[in-house]
Image (cartoon, rainbow, N blue to C red):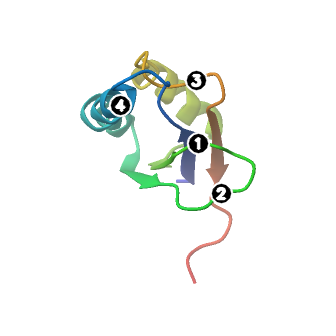
Amino acid sequence: MPKFLLIAINGPTDGEGDEAAYNEWYDQVHAVDLMSVEGARSVRRFKVEAQNRIDKPYVNVTEIEGESAEAVMKELAEKASTFSDKIDRSSSVFILGREITKSV
């Protein structure tokens, strides 16, 4: 079965307390939703330490096995598409990549 990585680069809105609320939502709600996606293998979060042209503080990586990119996106839409009002979606980005090279 093909393996996919969902990489999301995002962060909180700018209000007072928004970062704490964003992190709480991500850890307690969104990560659980992502792991409920059929084929989900792991959800990991990273604090950005260096960047080039994308000014967001977090990178989120979800490993998923699925039949196709379309099937994975359908599962994500059904199970992990409810977002907190504390996530700044105006400039958030994601990519879904299919593994083409095994670990060496």
- Residue 91 marker: none
Q: At 61% across and 32% down in the image, what residue appears? A: 92
**Gap in angstroms between the C-alphas marked 4 and 3:** 14 Å
Q: Position of residue 81 (x, y in %)?
A: 47, 21
State whether residue 8 is above or below residue 52: above
Q: At 54% across and 25% down in the image, what residue appears? A: 88
Residue type at the position of mark 1: Lys
Q: Secondary structure at mark 3?
A: loop
Residue type at the position of mark 2: Gln
**Gap in angstroms between the C-alphas marked 1 and 3:** 11 Å
Q: Earlier in the sequence, mark 1 or mark 4?
A: 4
Q: Residue furthest right?
A: 53
Q: Position of residue 6 (x, y in %)?
A: 55, 45
- Residue 56 marker: 1
Q: Are marks 2 and 3 in contact (CB under 8 Å)?
A: no
Residue type at the position of mark 3: Arg
Q: Secondary structure at mark 4?
A: helix
Residue 40 horizontal side relative to residue 53, left or right? left
